[in-house]
């Protein structure tokens, strides 16, 4: 795990991998709960029997945005900010969903610091590329460049 304790730390780690987190299994209860929260009950996510019969994967799949929303939790073991006053989601540059996450699959996140921009004496924007790895697949489930504004 990398620790970023200052703007200089962030600037110095550009281009470096920050770490790879622990595997998390995606179960049907989590998919159903996400469907309830987002009101996205498309059959490919929640109808187990229909997905077994009709989907190319032969099983339900997690919502792409469920996968995306897990990145902060999944990257928690990859890096942290010490001495920060606040860290805020600032946006994203690019998000791609490359492989379906079928129910029962395990995913983890590999994080690389791709950019750091000093905004002021106490503020830096960091861009981290998160590859959501799908156990047993050469292709990642998703790749996302997320920007965090950190105030030290």
Image: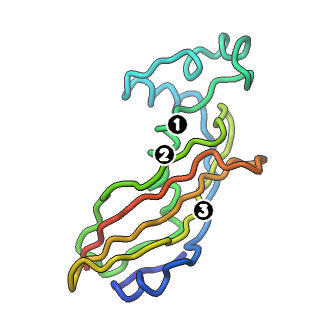
Q: Position of residue 57 (x, y in %)?
A: 73, 26
Residue at the location (22% across, 82% down)?
A: 122
Return the residue found at the far front: 93
**Image quadrant in which the C terminus is located:** bottom left
Q: Which residue is mark 3?
A: 110
Vertical side of 124 occupied by 121: above or below = below
Q: Are marks 3 and 2 in contact (CB under 8 Å)?
A: no
Q: Position of residue 58 (x, y in %)?
A: 74, 21
Left or right: where 104 falls relative to 39? right
Name which of mark 1 and mark 3 comes first in the sequence: 1
Q: Which residue is mark 2?
A: 68
Q: Are marks 1 and 2 in contact (CB under 8 Å)?
A: yes
Q: Mark 3 packing: few (<14 Cα in 10 Å), some, or many (20+)?
A: many
Q: Which residue is mark 1?
A: 64
Left or right: where 42 falls relative to 19? left
Q: Mark 1 packing: few (<14 Cα in 10 Å), some, or many (20+)?
A: some
The foreground one among 48 and 64 is: 64
Residue at the location (61% across, 65% down)?
A: 20
Left or right: where 121 falls relative to 144? left
Vertical side of 127 occupied by 99: above or below = above
The foreground one among 123 and 5 is: 123
Secondary structure beneath label 3: strand
Q: How many marks?
A: 3
Residue at the location (56% across, 23% down)?
A: 45
Secondary structure beneath label 2: helix
Left or right: where 39 falls relative to 105? left
The foreground one among 95 and 18 is: 95
Measure how far apart labels 1 and 2 are at the Cα level.
6 Å
Residue at the location (66% across, 10% down)?
A: 50
């Amino acid at each position: 795990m990398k620790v970023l304790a200052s703007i200089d730390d962030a600037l110095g780690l550009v281009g470096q991998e920050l770490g790879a987190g622990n595997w998390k299994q995606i179960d049907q209860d989590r998919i159903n709960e996400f469907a309830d929260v987002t009101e996205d009950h498309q059959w490919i996510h929640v109808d187990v029997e229909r997905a077994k019969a009709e989907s190319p994967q032969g099983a339900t799949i997690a919502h792409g945005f469920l996968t995306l929303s897990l990145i902060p939790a999944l990257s928690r073991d990859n890096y942290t900010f010490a001495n920060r006053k606040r860290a805020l989601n600032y946006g994203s540059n690019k998000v791609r969903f490359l492989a379906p996450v079928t129910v029962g699959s395990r995913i983890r996140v590999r994080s690389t610091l791709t950019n750091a921009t000093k905004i002021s004496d106490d503020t830096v924007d960091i861009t981290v590329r998160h590859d959501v790895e799908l156990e047993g697949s050469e292709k990642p489930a998703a790749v996302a460049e997320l920007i965090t504004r950190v105030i030290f």
